[in-house]
Image (cartoon, rainbow, N blue to C red):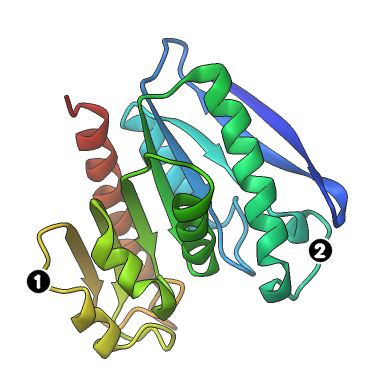
Amino acid sequence: MNLQNIEVKSKLGKPASYTYRQHTRDSRTLAVIFPGQAYYKDSPLMWYSAISAFQAGLDTLSVEYGFHANRIATARNMLDTSIDEAASALGNLQKSKNYENVVFIAKSVGTVIAERIAREKIEGVRDFIFLTPLPQTVQFIRDAKNMLVVVGTSDPLFSEVDIAGISGMHNVSIVKLDGADHLLEVEGNYEKSLEYLRESMTACHNFCAIVNHRD
């Protein structure tokens, strides 16, 4: 494995550091990891998403937003800046590596950022893994070519109505974790939380493996 940090300039001050994992042999597929607002690229779901994708044969690029690098808590009014910075970094990498497939793996507000980049900035992305998506991405989930959604039934930000809105569709696979919250954890139960982490990452790995071996 080749591991490097890619410095990305940020309008917010200190540059961000993206983590790029590359197989020693050329990979045909790249996974891009978009964290949440207060959930960093090295937080459990993001870290293990990158590891599971890498073990499925994908190169991975883990995004650090400028507001993360500069320790700015409020991110909602900085989405446009985050989208531009991430899209620019991804575009530069695509030019140099020319990946055949790209998978977006995103959590929470990262699902909004991933949607905007796919719609407005980077053409041809058709495979997505959304962990604890936000309600405003429901229509995008319904429209996506190939989508895996992992959500907890006790997530206050994604209701049963939202889950129903993406259910029963041929292009959307859903993993519903009973009693899990917005972190895909069960409060006060570390054993169940670890079980759900394993289940989520197994689904992520399997999804990425299928994409990587698709003709």
Mark 2 or 1, closer to the camera: 1
Residue 37's disc number: none
The spot of residue 210 in percent (x, y) is 19, 36
- Residue count near mark 1 (Cα–Cα under 10 Å), binned few <14, some 14–19, many ≥20: few
Direction right: furthest residue: 13
Task: State which quadrant residue 101 falls in.
Answer: top left
> Which residue carries the number 1 mark?
168
Q: Mark 1 or mark 2, which is nearer the start of the sequence?
A: 2
Q: Residues within 10 Å of mark 2 (few under 14, many from 20)?
A: few
User: Which residue corresponds to the image point at 53% horizontal and 53% vertical from the top-left?
Assistant: 34
Question: Which corner quadrant holds the C terminus?
Answer: top left
Q: Give the side of residue 26 with respect to residue 17, left or right.
A: left
What SS does tag 2 mark? Answer: loop
Q: Residue at x 60, y 44 (%)?
A: 87
Question: Which amino acid is tagged 1?
Answer: Gly
Dot 2 amino acid type: Arg
On the image, the x and y values in percent for residue 193 come to 37, 69
Q: Which mark is residue 71?
A: 2
Q: Where residue 59 appears, x then y in whole percent? A: 45, 28
Give the quarter of the image for residue 153. bottom left
Q: Residue at x 60, y 24 (%)?
A: 3
